[in-house]
Image (spheres, rainbow, N blue to C red):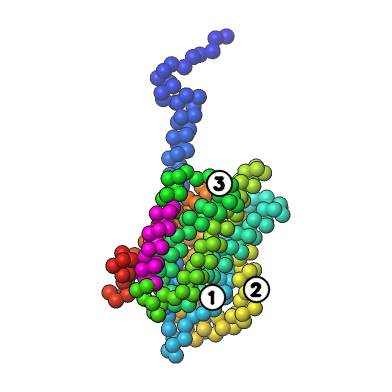
Amino acid sequence: MVAHKPDAESLRHHGVNGKHSGSTRKSGGDRLKLLGGASGIYFFFIRYGKMQEKIFRYRGAAGQQFTAVWSLQFFEACVNVLVALIGRTCTGTMDLRSLHMHRLLMCSGLGQVVSKYCLSASLAAGLSFPVATLAKSAKMLPVMIGSLLVGGQRFSARQWAQAGAIVGGTSIVTYAEQGAKAGGRSTAAGLALVLLALGCDGVVGGVQRRFKRQCKEEGKQERSYDMMFWTNLYMALAALVAALSKQELLAFRSFARKNPKVFGDILQLSACGAMGQACIFWTIANFDSVVCTAVTTTRKLASVLLSLAERSQGESLSPTGW
């Protein structure tokens, strides 16, 4: 029996061995996936940033401000766990009985909760929201370094140059604002906290990359809600221990009761954070932490521009900052 030999027209239409057309569909599908994840990250975290700024800029009748940062992290993580649990119920779970994989998830959770605490604590310490957010936008470089050292990922010279340009630009803005507002809202303590947050981001990026590699080696399909559930569970436990050690839970409850408006903002913050995290873990599961960081970096810049647009002229960035 003679096998039929496809003609040139068939090859052009279907692609050689059928690979070309499948690759094209996959590439188009990947772009749609990235667009969907990025849209969710933008939508929910821009609102999250507005609520975060509102909470830490609030002053009560007696001039008191919100300082129970660890309690806020615990509350947020609990809401994230609840949303992830619902997602796991709807989409299924993956086999995570491996102790090594749980160690990676625990390291990721601890790194993330410390990073989030440092950013919130920098706002509570007096660092302005635009400066804190711009400084945090430099996280792409530490995430790449963490992915290289911990996760074994390689990057091109062009990628390093792009990350360096982002870090250089945000550093100039941060330095300009620190000098322009010396003795004001931007404080050295706040900037030190942001630097610590960036270091934690680098560790988290590397751990997440290693987790993806471990899943591939064990032949397991990553599920975003599983990653979100376990990471936030470890975040909640760490934040609870810290809040109890600092006796913050009662202070958090008292402040929320005396200032119900702020508690409403905290609820919105937590809801937007949970939905935004679902989009983040979905993006990480389908791509990697560096791609996700590129999306969140541009989102932070959008948050800063919106924040400045809502402020009075006297609170805008300096000419050097622009």
Q: Position of residue 48 (x, y in %)?
A: 44, 67
Toward the viewer: 250 or 139?
139
Q: Residue at x 52, y 65 (%)?
A: 197
Q: Is residue 11 left or right of residue 207?
A: left
Q: Quadrant of residue 261?
A: bottom left
**Residue depicted at 40% across the width and 54% down the height:** 165
Q: Which residues are magenta?
A: 163-178
Which badge, 2 or 1, is on the more N-terminal residue?
1
Which residue is at the front of the view, 172 or 150? 172
Q: Which residue is mark 2?
A: 241
Depth order, front residue of 320/306: 320
Horizontal relation, residue 89 to residue 132: left or right: right
Query: Residue 228: x and y, percent?
Result: 58, 58
| Residue beneath the point at 47% across and 50% down | 291
Residue at the extreme bottom: 62
Q: Is residue 10 visible?
A: yes
Mark 2 surroundings within 10 Å by alpha-carbon count, few (fewer than 14), some (14 through 19), many (20 or more): some
Cα separation between marks 2 and 1: 13 Å
Quarter of the picture holding the C terminus = bottom left
On screen, 239 above or below 60?
above
Disc 3 crowd, CA 10 A, few/some/many (<14, 14-19, 20+)? some
How far apart, in angstroms, are the residues tagged by discs 3 and 1? 34 Å
Hey, what amino acid is under mark 3? Gln
Q: What amino acid is found at the position of numbered circle 2 in the picture?
A: Val
Decide: marks 3, 1 in contact (CB < 8 A)? no
Res 153 label: 3
Mark 1, Cα crowd under 10 Å, few <14 / some 14-19 / many 20+, is: many
Identify the residue under disc 1.
69
Image height check: is 272 above or below 216? below
Camera-side mark, 3 or 1: 3
Indicate the secondary structure of the residue bearing disc 2: helix
SS label for mark 1: helix
